[in-house]
Image: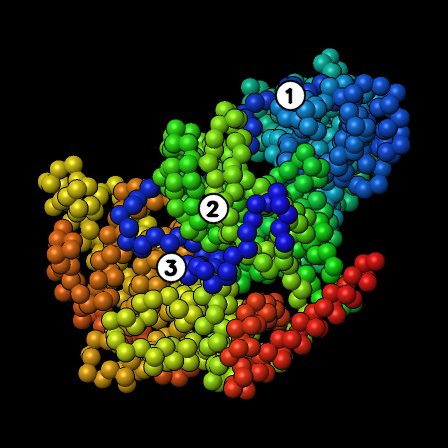
Amino acid sequence: MMSDNFHGRLIDRHSSQNNHRYCGNHRPKSYFSDDVTGEEEFDPFEGDEVDERADMASFAPPESKWLHRQMNRTTAEQLLQGNGKVGSYLVRESDRKKGLFVLSYLGESGINHFQIKSLFGAYYIGGRQFSSLRHLIGFYTSFCDLLKKERLLHPVPPKEPFRERKRVVAVLPYSQLPETDELSFSRGDIFTVHNDLGDGWLWCTLERTQESGLVFKELVEELEDNSDPNDIYPWFHGAISKDEAVDKLRKMGSGSFLIKNSDNSPGHYSLFFYMSNTIHRFRIEKRGSRYIMGNRMFETLEDIVMMYRNEQIIAGYRLGTPVLKSPLEASVAARRSQEIGNKSEDVYVTLRESREMSKKNKSVRMRGFLCKKSAKSKKWKNYFFVLDSKEQHLYYYENDRRTRPKGLVDLNYSFLYLVHDSLFERPNCFQLVERPLPCMSTVYYLCAPSYEILQEWIQAIRPFCVQQLMKGQSLSSNATEVRTLFVTLLEAHRLPIKLVPHPFCIISLNQVKVCRTQVKCPPDPIWEEDFVLEDMPCDVNSFSITLYTKGKRSKDTEVAEMVIELNKLNNGIEIEDWFPLTGICPPMNNEWGSLRVRIRYVHELIMPSHEYDALKELLMAEDLEVISVLEEFCHRDRAPLANALLRVFKHESKEAILLKSMIEREIKRENETSTLFRMNSLTTTLMDQYMRTTCHTFLMKALKDSLQRVLETRQSCELNPSRLDSLQEACANAEHLLSLLDDVVEKIFRSVEHCPATLRYICGCLQRAVSAKWPNDHYVKTRVVGSFIFLRLICPAILNPRVFNIINETPSEIAARSLILIAKSLQNLANLVEFGVKEPWMEVVNPFILKNKARMIKFLNDLSNVYECPDPEDIPRGDASRELATVHSLCELYKDEIFNLSHNRTTLRKLVAVSDMLTKHKLHYSEACQTTLS
C-alpha cells in the first residue's frame, strides 16, 4: 500500500475508457479544431543562456599566474593547500594522458579536479566548449559558478613559466581539399601546433592568417626556439656579415643574389644582388607575419624572390642565380627541406594514403547524421555524428568531410534519456545529459530521421553512458531490468488566474524535461493527456510535474510543481489522486491549486528471447484468438499492446499478415459502412502506428513542397466571417486557398509510387474485403482507403508537419489556420462529400471537390492496386524479447479476466499456463541477478 503521506488511492483499472495514445502527439482535441495558437516551439534552454558576446578572456588573470607544466594530482593538492585560501585554483597539464589539462580547485568541501580536454584548438569542460584556457578561466571567474555558489578566486602561480606550444615551418607548399578542414599554405609558413591527431596529421594555427586546420606532418619541420623560420630557404644566409655576403656573391658571379638578416635593423632583412661589379642592397621590412619591399607587401620571402626572378628588380635586370648555403651552414630545417624537396612527389602520395587511412578509424562504433537543437539559435540543425568507442566520446561535425568537430559529448559522464514526442512536437528525439559533477550539467537534444535509426543510435550510445546497465542486470543471465512510467495528466483545479494566465505542464525525470502538455485556460484546465515514459535510466528516483505559464512575448515562467518519489509507488499498481502544487516563484505562500494525475510505474525484467517462444507461438496463431482477448481488456493499454504486436510480427516479417487479418476481422463484425473504422480500436491503432513508421518518404514527396509554400506565404486563407475583420477579405482568401489546394492535390496524386508497397497491398486487401461485404455501395472502397490514407495519415501530417518530421520551423498563426482549412477540404474530398449548411462559408471549396472527385477515386484505386504481398522492405534487427515482455506484462495485469474466459477455450488455457510459466521464470532470473549483485 502507499504510505499515508502520499494521499494516494488505488483505483479500478477499468474505470476509465480514455484513448491511450502511445509515443505520439498525445493531444485528444479534434483534428479540425478552430483553435490556432501559432505558438513557437518550446525552448528547453530558457534561463540557461550566457552572453557569449562578452570577452571572457579579459576577466581571467594572465596564464603565467595559474598555468603549470605537467604535474600529478598530489603535487597540485599540496600547492593548493599551501596557498590555504578557499577559491584557490591552478590549471596543469595531465601527467597521465596526452591532450588533457586539469583544473584543480580548493573549495568549501575540499579539493576537486576537473578534466579539461584539449582538441583541435578548443577546450572542453563539463559539456562546455571554450576557444582558449583564458576564456575558460574567465568564464568560471566572472560568469558562472564552478560549484554551487563558488567561483575561481585565487590563482596559484607556477614556479617556472609554462612552455610555449611547439612551432613548425612548412617545407613544401600545399592546397587544401575543398570542403575539408585542411589548410592551404606556402613554403616558409609558420604554424603553432595544438594537437597531434595521429595518422600523420597535426591540428595547427597558421600564424600568418590565424586560421586553424589540418597540416600533414611530412610537409613541416619543427622550429627550434631561437631559429629563424626562413632558414629553410637555401638562399637565406641568416646572420652572416656584410663582407661575407659580398664575397659569396662575387664568387658566384653577375646576377647572383642572397637574403640575410639586416645588419642595422634587427628583425628585418636585406636582399643582396650582384650585377655588373656592383652590389645592390634592398631593405625588407618584417611587419607582423608579412614582408614589405619597395612599397609592396609579400606573404613570404620566397614570394619576393619569385616576383623579381620574373620582373625587373633594377632597370634591365632580374634576379639570377641564388647563392646557396653549404651543407655545413644549413640548419636542420634547411637540410630537411632540401631532402623533402628532392622527393616531394613521394610525400604527396603518402599524404593521400594517410588521408584515406584516417577515415578507417577502428574505434568508430557508429556514424551518421542527426539533428541537434541549438541553445544559441533555438533551431534544429543537421550535424554529422561520430561515436568513438575508445574515447567514449560522441563528436558532431558540420558535415562528413570535416575533421574538427563542432563539439563533443563526453559519455563517461552522460546519462541517456528518451524525449517524448510532445516536448518538441516531433518524433524520434532523445537527449544526453552530461553531468561531470552534480553542479555541472549540459543537455544535448538530438533527433533521428526515423524510429529505426533512433533505436540504432540509442543501442550504440547506451553502453558507454553512466550506469546505463540497469540495476540487477547480469551478463551471465542475459536478463535486463527496465522501468516504464505511465502518466495521465487529467486536470487542474483552482489555479491562480493572475499568475497562470496560460497554463501548461512539463513532466521531468530527475529534473530532466521529457514531455509537455498543451496550453490551456485557467482556473480549471482539462488536459486528459497520456504519456508513456520508457527506458528510464537507473539513476531516476523521482519525477515532477511543473506548472508553467506560456509567455506570448516573454519567456515561459515556472510557477509551481509537484514531485513524486518512485520508491513510494507500488510496482504495476495504478493510482489516481489530486496532488497539491507547491509554489516555486513569489509569492511562495500563495494557493497554487492542485493537479489530478493517474500514475502507474512498471519495473519489469526482460528475459532472453527464447523464453518467450511459447507466447510468440500463441500470438501468431492464425485465429488471432489471443490478440482478440487482449484487445477486449486492454482499452487503456491499447497503444503499448499495438506497438508490441507490430514489432513482434515485424521481427517475423509478418506485419502485413497481422494487419490484413485484423482489418478483415473488423469488417466482418461491422454492419454499417458509416461507422466502419470511425472509432479507435486495436486495428486502427495498429494501422496508425504502421503508417507513421513507414510513410515518411511518401509524406515528404507528397507534402513537403506544398507545406513549405504555405509556411512562406503571408496571405490568409480564412473564410469564416466571425474570424474576418472585413468580409471583403473573403474573396482574396478563397482564391488563395483554392490555389494552395490545387498545388497540394497535384503533388499527392503524383506520389502513388512513393507509398510503401506493403501499405498499398494492405489497402488493396481493405478494398477487396469491403467490396465483398457491400457490393452495391460503389464508393465504400474509396472511402475506406481514404479514411486511413487521409484521415489518419495525410491530414494529421498537414495539421502537424513538425510532428511528422516534414518541416522544422513552427507555422505562424496564419499558416497554422491555412493548414487546418487545407486538411478540412482534403478530408471532405477523400470522403467524396461537399460542404453544406453546417459550414456555409466553406461552400466556396465545393467546385474544387467536384472537379477532383474522379481523380481522388483513381488515386486511391491506383494506390490500392497491389494484389501480391511484397517482400519485406527492412531486415529485422535484434530480437523481440522487449515487446514479448510487454505482452506478458499485460497478460499478468489481466490474468483474472483471461482465466475466467479460459474454462471452455483451449487456446486461453494455454495462454494462462504460458503466462504463469513466464512469471516463474522471471522470478528465477530476478533471484539470479540479485545473487550476482550480492
The Cα–Cα distance between marks 1 and 3, rounded to whole angstroms, is: 48 Å
Disc 1 crowd, CA 10 A, few/some/many (<14, 14-19, 20+): some
Earlier residue among tags 2 and 3 = 2
Q: Is residue 434 left or right of residue 814?
A: right
Residue 680 in the image: above or below residue 548: below
Dot 1 corresponds to which residue? 142
**Which residue is drawn at the image coordinates 14% and 43% (left, top)?**
721
Indicate how the structure is coloured in the image: rainbow
Residue 730: x percent and y percent? 13, 44
Q: Circle 2 is placed at which residue position?
A: 596
Task: Kindly tell me whether residue 879 is visible in this rendering.
Answer: yes
Instruction: Tell me which residue sits at (14%, 51%) in the image.
Output: 841
Marks 1 and 2 sit apart, C-alpha to C-alpha, by 44 Å
Q: Secondary structure under badge 1?
A: helix
Q: Amino acid at mark 3?
A: Met
Residue 60 image position (x, y, % from top left)? 68, 20
Q: Quadrant of the N terminus?
A: bottom right
Where does residue 180 sit, x and y in percent of width and height? 58, 47
Residue holding disc 3: 700
